[in-house]
Image (cartoon, rainbow, N blue to C red):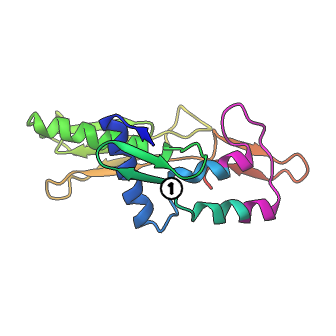
Amino acid sequence: TLSLTPVANALFKESFKIEKLTDGRVTPSIGILLDLWGLRRGQTPQIPDTADIIKAQKSLLIKHFSLLAPNKIIIHKTIRPIFGAFTEGFALDFARKVLEKNNIQDYLVEIGGDFIWKGKNPKKEAWTIALTDPHNKTTPLGVLKLNDFKGQGGALSTSGNYQQFFTDSLTGKKFHHII
């Protein structure tokens, strides 16, 4: 049993909700597959054996963690959780709560390619963002106007296959972190 800070406890709770909503397709236990592919920093990327992939996928169905109230967790199996799919959204939700608690009605916040917004920009127009072309940083892929959805604001998440990837030396096929 490990003790958690209130923030870590909230992050685990939120990740468990998302894991349940996605039937385990989005899980902090994904590190098992990242290790198998060598997609963590400091590892050598590799194409794993199909049998190892199937074994890792089955392992994702096992309950790895249980939260105990208050702020305690049991780790059922030795695993390094990965919260990459959760932390940016978690931080954006926290930022939204702080902004709204302080009665800020118009905002645009970006963390690592993920956005939340509400209201309008200082010119009283819809917030606008440009999507960077990773191969030509001087010309955007496109520009998006972010609608406010009847005062509820919105959220957008981006990811790309151009940073965390490797190319198989035998086939030339590109493999990336979006598993």
State the image coordinates of residue 94 (x, y, percent, origin top left). Answer: 27, 39
User: In this picture, is 159 found above or below 20?
Assistant: above
Q: Is residue 38 magenta?
A: yes
> In the displayed structure, does residue 147 sit left or right of residue 47?
left
Disc tally is 1
Residue ID at (74%, 35%) = 43
Residue ID at (54%, 44%) = 81
Camera-side residue of 161 and 53? 53
Confirm whether residue 115 shows in the render: no
> In the displayed structure, does residue 104 sit left or right of residue 166?
left
Residue sticking out furthest to the bottom: 23
State the image coordinates of residue 127 (x, y, percent, origin top left). Answer: 26, 42
Residue ID at (32%, 44%) = 10
> In the displayed structure, does residue 170 sit left or right of residue 8?
right
Residue sticking out furthest to the right: 170
Query: Quadrant of residue 100 in the image?
Result: top left
Dot 1 surroundings within 10 Å: few (below 14), some, or many (20 or more)? many
Residue ID at (66%, 47%) = 34
State the image coordinates of residue 67 (x, y, percent, origin top left). Answer: 38, 51
Residue sticking out furthest to the left: 103
Camera-side residue of 94 and 149? 94
State the image coordinates of residue 60 (x, y, percent, origin top left). Answer: 59, 61
User: In this picture, is 19 found above or below 106?
Assistant: below
Query: Quadrant of residue 42 in the image?
Result: top right
Q: Which residues are magenta?
A: 34-54
Q: Which residue is mark 1?
A: 27
The quarter of the picture where the N terminus appears is: top left
Q: Is residue 139 magenta?
A: no
Camera-side residue of 108 and 94? 94
The quarter of the picture where the C terminus appears is: bottom right
| Residue type, numbered disc 1 | Thr
- Badge 1 element: loop
